[in-house]
Amino acid sequence: MKKLIELFTAGELADKLLSKAEYRPFPDIGQRNEWEALPEVLRQSIIAEGETYLDYQWPMLTATMYLEFKLNGNRSRYDIPYHLRRRAVTSLALAECVENKGRFLNDLVNGVWLISEESNWVISAHNRMFQKREPSLSNVAEQPGIDLFAAETGSLFAWLHYLLRPVLNRINPLIDERIVLELRRRILDPYLQRDDCWWMGLAEREKRLNNWTPWCTSNCLNAFLLVEEDPKRREQAVRKAMESLDRFLAMHPADGGCDEGPGYWNKAGGSLFDCLELLHAASGGQFEPYAEPLVQNIGQYIYKAHIHNKYFLNFADGPHQITIEGDLVYRYGDKIGDANMMAIGAAFHDMLGANGWKNMKFLSFLRVLPALFNYRAIEDDSRPLEFRRDMWMDGIQVMAARETGSSDRGLYTAMKGGHNEESHNHNDIGHFVVYVDGLPVLIDVGVEEYSAKTFSSQRYEIWTMQSGYHNLPTINGFMQRDGTRFRATDAVYEAGEERSSLTLNVASAYPPEAGIDRWTRTVRLHRRPQTFIELEESFAFADSQACRFTLNFMTCCLPDVAADGHIAFPRDGADALLMEYDAGLFTAVVETVALEDKKLRNSWGDRLYRLVLTPARSVQNGSYTIRFRQP
């Protein structure tokens, strides 16, 4: 696609870029008609949430809590109160904007002061400088750059300045002055002065970018547009933002697929849309990149990966259930002219109702304000949501196929190829999932709560990252390895009325010591004359080496193994899925996987199961077929 930075010449951008005084994206607290025109159910929801923070006991953030990530890998003891502070400030500010009686200002000012006094807005897990040194209190306070949440905090402070400056000044002008001072020294100046923040994509031109680039960029850009008065600095920031976004888009698969999964699309494709909307508004509506196929494809990914209700296709680190931000998705669909994207946005808007704004994981004015002032437009939209029978994204090598056009009826399967150095990678080449009537049966487990191990050289010591805990074979005792050279080859995708399939050679995903010459795996959904999912494995080994392998299947349903080659997967007191295999060729064992991690327990309960099929004998080459059908 054409580079964003080429859409305007330097002179055109200087002419079209609105000044701080001209840039009025949403009403401030003084524009009472707009705030009082919000639907009453929304106003009451916002005020009620703000009231939960009256006389708030602000959580402590101590030096030892910050040091803890370096010392033992724990990041939640610091991160949780860090985010609670910011959510409280946002909720108090919104409540004051709605009510305008001064009730929430004292608590709000206390929150602003506490956040201003924090030694560092960069969380400990993201402070690379801190991680590379022995922990000490001096290097905690050093400026390590701008991370996701420093940028989010900067955006929060910018909105406080924009929305509430007159009422804050009536208390004391020092409050707003402090907001701007902290914003300038922690975000605005570093953003212009530094190119070495990796997510900018400027210093290391070949470094792989991910959700950090549009996420950080959207918040930094927002801060400049709301606060910066110097026209040259505003223009410099806009150009830098466009250059970073161009680097992100240049690396993005043309099919729009997000290799981080739909759980991260919110801050990848979703934050890209935030950036585009900021540039659109700041140019007086003259920045219009929405006809670009890549921009459209990135948006459409979110409904292509939708399975049913809150279930989404969750390869990599993402959870299998997510709550998408309906307003964001709706507005993105509207801008690219995609009715189905608008429909899924409206569906989630309806699902959550007037309290939907509170479900945003990182409560941000950048998302909340559009959701509030666009509420009525979505509320009146009842267009139907359609589910694609087939989906194939060749850039990230992900396919999905469903039996029917109803998300809660029939079989659904999905499979992935790609390579084992994707963003938030798991070693999962050839992995597939099966849903029945919209519910998971053969699953992708997801990921535990993040710790120091998660993004370190020890990542693949974590069981959820290993191929042995995906629906994959373990071959001659070897699981898949991580790295770009460990990948799928010879991908063949086919889709038709009667059947859809993906075939991959996954041999290259395993180390050479596994001795594999070829391992071809096909997942095929048959729709008629009979409906079933077929897993076909065909393999050959070099140097007359016999193959010893196991086939692993992860499930949230306790498998019931019968002696006749049938395995039932029950859900809610009835068999949801039957697995058919040759009992003369395989033995089946069910292992219980106890879940101790809080995040996984919240997703799946206290246990999962691994079904392991082991061949009765070793052979140098062969093929097997396993079928899955509804009873």
Image: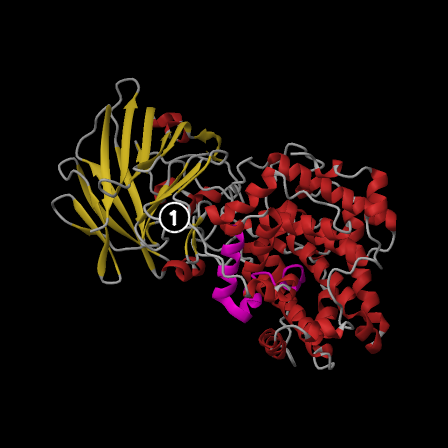
Q: Position of residue 25 (x, y in %)?
A: 74, 60
Q: Which residue: 69% across, 76% down?
A: 36
Q: Which of 586 and 352 is in front in this view?
A: 352
Q: Where is residue 279 in the image (x, y as percent from the top left)?
A: 73, 49
Residue type at numbered disc 1: Asp
Q: Which of 28 and 286 is in front in this view?
A: 286
Q: Which residue: 59% across, 52% down?
A: 334
Q: Which residue lies furthest to the top in this view?
A: 543
Depicted 242 relative to depicted 364: above or below: above
Residue 365 is one of the magenta-drawn residues: yes
Q: Say left or right for 497 vs 168.
A: left
Q: Which residue: 56% across, 35% down?
A: 254
Q: Name the residue under label 1.
A: 444
Magenta region, residue range: 341-369
Q: Is the magenta stretch mostly helix, strand or loop?
A: helix
* Disc 1: CA contacts within 10 A as few (<14), some (14-19) or many (>=20): many
Q: Say left or right for 33 vs 472.
A: right
Q: Position of residue 557 (x, y in %)?
A: 28, 55
Q: Which element is circle 1 on?
A: loop
Residue 527 is one of the magenta-drawn residues: no
